[in-house]
Structure formats: C-alpha cells, structure tokens
C-alpha cells in the first residue's frame, strides 16, 4: 500500500510512517519545511516538500498520484492565529481532497478534533479555539460529502505522549478523555486496513477494547 500523509512531520504522522514502513508499505509525508526532510527519511518515509497553504491543486495532485490512500494529519499548530486555522485546518484539508479526487485516490482518512461539530461554543472559549473547531467542522463536512471519496474521520480526544496501551474506545460520541498519540497512529493504521469503515465519523479516546476489535466494531 502507498500512503501519502499531509502534515508528515507531526508527532502522530511520524509514528504512523514508522508503522507503515515497518510492515513493508510505502509512505510519503508532505511537509512545508525542508529542514524536516531528514526526520522523515529517518522514519523510512519519502519527503515531499510542498506548502499546502500556497500549493495549487495540480501540485498536490502530482504529490498524491499513485497512492492508495491519503491521510490529513496537518494542523496550524500551537501559537497560530485564527486565520491559519482556516488556511491549514480547513483549506488544506479540502485541497488534499480536491487533489485526491483529481489523482483517482478515493481513500481519505482525516484526523479531526473531538466535538468538531459542536456549535454551542460561546465567548467563554478563546476565539482561536473556536476558529479551530469551526475549521475542523467545515473541513469534515466538505470531505464527508464527496461521492468520489471513501472517507473516514477520526476525532481523538486530548493527545498525550504516554506509551500506547493498544486499547481504545471508539464511538460516535465518547465523552471527554485523552489518548496517547501512538494509539491514535495505530488506529489510523487499522482504519487504512478496513475499507468497510469508510463513511464513518467517530471519536476516539483510551479505553478497554483492543484497537483491531474497536475498529472492526465501528464499520459502517
């Protein structure tokens, strides 16, 4: 399997790249900063230097052509303002979907955010956080509604750098919780291997169910 990951230098993405390479798959990570090329190569991934905030559909189409699946794991990151939540978390995710369709890549896996569809957030929440949630919700709705894509949207809870347990809870709504990044990456790997989970949107936190079983139970 050939997988292209947008946001290829993120913590979850690097773990997923190592998992894919470790079992013999081919993986490429799309990154903006050429200084990160060595980290991707150390993980066994090809590095594609391309700024998704400025790239054309044609450029991204060339980057994903020949892939079996794409994963959107990019994000504007801590310290970025509301505008970049829109240009990265929303617009870049939509751009990747446009490019995937143009390249004939029909499998799309989105790393989203818990409660992305919660429109009840009021002024007690930081404006940047509200912009982030709106951007994720808009991106999810866009890619989920495309007939040409088999999309799975994964909405993890609070991310930690603890060691993974291999056990999770997957549900349409899990309630608040946390999850190690390594377990998120393992769930993404299982999702890539489960075509029948296309069309599903689910939340993800740590739990008591082995990942393979949890993903299998979440099939549409």
Image: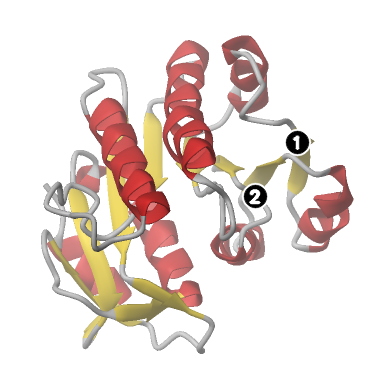
Q: Position of residue 198 (x, y in %)?
A: 24, 41
Q: Residue at coordinates 67% horizontally, 44% vertically from top-left?
A: 29
Badge 2 marks a residue whose secondary structure is loop
Mark 2 or mark 1, which is nearer the start of the sequence? 2
CB atoms at circles 1 and 2 under 8 Å apart?
A: yes
| Displayed quadrant of residue 57 | top right
| Displayed quadrant of residue 110 | top left
| Displayed quadrant of residue 140 | top left
The dot on residue 48 is: 1
Direction front: furthest residue = 123
Q: Residue at coordinates 42% horizontally, 26% vertically from top-left?
A: 94
For the residues labelled 1 and 2, the Cα–Cα distance comes to 9 Å
Q: Position of residue 89 (x, y in %)?
A: 46, 41
Q: Is residue 151 rendered to the left or right of residue 9?
A: left
Quick one: 206 or 65, which is closer to the camera? 206
Residue underneath mark 2: 8
| Quarter containing the N terminus | top right
Q: Residue at coordinates 62% horizontally, 58% vertically from top-left?
A: 10
Q: Is residue 182 rendered to the left or right of residue 179?
A: right
Q: Compared to 47, does 101 lie above or below?
A: above
Q: Is residue 105 visible?
A: no
Q: Compared to 106, does 103 lie above or below?
A: above
Q: Dot 1 surroundings within 10 Å: few (below 14), some, or many (20 or more)?
A: many
Q: Position of residue 112 (x, y in %)?
A: 35, 51
Badge 1 marks a residue whose secondary structure is strand
């Amino acid at each position: 399997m050939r997988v292209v990951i947008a946001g290829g230098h993120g913590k979850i993405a690097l773990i997923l790249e190592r998992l894919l390479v470790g079992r013999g798959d081919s993986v490429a990570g799309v990154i903006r900063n050429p200084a990160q090329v060595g980290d991707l190569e150390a993980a066994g991934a090809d590095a594609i230097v391309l700024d998704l905030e400025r790239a054309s559909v044609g450029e991204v189409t060339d980057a994903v052509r020949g892939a079996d699946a794409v994963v959107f794991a990019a994000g504007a990151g801590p310290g970025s303002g509301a505008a970049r939540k829109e240009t990265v978390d929303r617009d870049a995710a939509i751009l990747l979907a446009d490019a995937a369709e143009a390249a004939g890549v029909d499998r799309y896996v989105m790393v989203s955010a818990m409660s992305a569809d919660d429109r009840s957030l009021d002024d007690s929440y930081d404006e940047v956080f509200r912009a982030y949630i709106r951007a994720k919700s808009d991106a999810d709705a866009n890619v989920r509604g495309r007939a040409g894509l088999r999309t799975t949207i994964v909405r993890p809870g609070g991310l930690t750098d603890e060691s993974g347990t291999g056990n999770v809870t997957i549900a349409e709504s899990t309630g608040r919780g946390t999850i190690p990044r390594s377990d998120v990456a393992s769930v993404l790997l299982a999702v890539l291997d489960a075509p029948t989970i296309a069309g599903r949107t689910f939340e993800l936190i740590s739990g008591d169910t082995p990942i393979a079983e949890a993903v299998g139970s979440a099939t549409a």
